[in-house]
Image: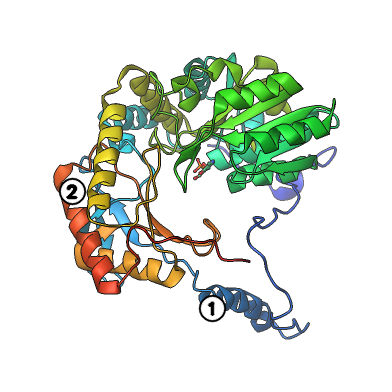
Amino acid sequence: METIPPKAAIPPPASQPKREGRMPVNRMPATIKIAETDAAPHKPGLGRAAYESHFRTALDRLHGERRYRVFADIERIAGRFPIAHWRKPDGGTSEITVWCSNDYLGMGQHPDVVNAMTQTAMRCGVGAGGTRNIAGNNSPLVDLERELADLHGKEAGLVFTSGYVSNQAGISTIAKLIPNCLILSDAFNHNSMIEGVRHSGCEKRIFRHNDLAHLEELLIAAGDRPKLIAFESVYSMDGDVSDIGAICDLADRYGAMTYLDEVHAVGLYGPRGGGISERDGVMHRVDVIEGTLAKGFGCVGGYITGTSVLCDAVRSHAPGFIFTTALPPAIAAAARASVRYLKRSAVEREAHQRQAARTKVALEAAGLPVLHTETHIVPVMVGDAELCKAAADHLLEHHGIYIQPINYPTVPRGTERLRITPSPFHDDAKIAKLTAALAETWDTLDLPRAGTVFVEAAE
Ligand SMILES: Cc1ncc(COP(=O)(O)O)c(C=O)c1O
């Protein structure tokens, strides 16, 4: 039998090992401002209540600005996507149809993906056992990185715990490793990219959203110094798309590197699901392609792909990679199964586009203010935070339809909306039911109809 030595018998370490996780405190997203002036003054020595008052003040402010968020308590039902159980505030339960999931293709419930996950969990257990620096790579993760590199036609891939982390760690580390780097960032870039830019500590210029003339102006003004252009393919709130080829032309002309977020496009566009850059035949021209495993691929995790040396440098320098536990093997195996499946099968992509197009046609025919998009995203505009929440509540309570309201700071004030994401499983009958439910909700709440101009409120 093993005996545990008394504490005194354990020799002290020769030197203190370097602590993991000693990172600078994360900053608030750029868009969230805490006005200190109207917060209750902190009086030292008053105990817990004084601290609590700060949190209450912060929450009160959100309530006052009508952007306090409430999450519905729902449980997805495997095999019945997009149906889920809603646990109501009164304790009861009912079945609802989810119309706002970013599991765009329902791959989170695909048998190949679920089997890969359960079988790998039975074989390898649940956790990853630590950071990769400490516990080593797990083999399914290595296989996944090869699969992703192949998906984007790059030499290497590097997986992170989320798409958010991959952007924050990827952009900040890449830019930091290039002396005197100037980052040129699209004005509509996701918060994870904004945080990556900030954490790099590099100088930045923001170009007007998808405005190539402005980007060129800034590239010219930057002169000979190294430059990194950071942009997205599909912008997820307005559903618009960037001209990746034209941005690569500018990058070539002015000697810049390109970093492309394909989070809302991987699995969904291109002959093998490589994203908009694959669809447009320009994937090989982009230096770094970043993606998520959580949306089109239905799992969790994020990644970058690029040259071997770039991925190795990020692996070796990015705190967001080094100091956090790796993605577990079962998740890696599930994600790989999803990526592999969608490389071969276009059925889901075609059905996805078809049902999204049919949803837009049906909602427009009903006179609803649908924002025109070239993609699978169907924003229906409301233009007011309170009404947007009221519409979402009404749809859930009276029609069993779940669409999360999208309010500031995710979108500018005055452009609040319901963001609808049809999947291949939202069949024509579900679209008809959605259309009738939205029309009734718009009538009941007297919401703005098609033709209304929604103007961003001044800050
Ligand atoms: C454009 C964009 N990039 C990155 C992310 C983060 O991806 P993940 O959800 O995998 O963390 C999101 C999340 O919605 C996003 O919209």
Decide which of 76, 115 is in the foreground and name it: 76
Residue 157 % position (x, y): 57, 22
Decide which of 380, 399 is in the foreground and name it: 380
Q: State the SS at label 2.
A: helix
First along the sequence among labels 1 and 2: 1
Residue 129, above or below 455: above
Decide which of 38, 157 is in the foreground and name it: 38
What separation in Å lies between label 1 and label 2 (alpha carbons)? 36 Å
Decide which of 361, 178 is in the foreground and name it: 361
Q: State the SS at label 1.
A: helix
Q: Residue furthest left?
A: 429
> Residue, x 22% and y 48% (percent of image)?
362
- Ligand 1 within 8 A of label 2's CB? no
Instruction: Look at the numbered discs 1 and 2 and tell me whether their residues touch, using CB distance below 8 Å.
Output: no
> Residue, x 45% and y 68% (percent of image)?
385
Q: Which residue is mark 1?
A: 64
Q: For residue 107, which numbered disc appears in the image? A: none
Q: Is residue 409 visible?
A: yes
Residue 230, above or below 367: above
Q: Is residue 174 visible?
A: no
Picture quadrant of residue 425: top left
Q: Which residue is mark 2?
A: 430
Picture quadrant of residue 435: bottom left
Residue 321 % position (x, y): 65, 34
The amino acid type found where label 1 is placed reads Gly
> Residue, x 47% and y 44% (percent of image)?
236
Q: Would you call the spot at circle 2 few (<14 residues within 10 Å), some (14-19), or many (20 or more)?
A: some
Picture quadrant of residue 311: top right
Screen quadrant of the C terminus: bottom right
The amino acid type found where label 2 is placed reads Lys
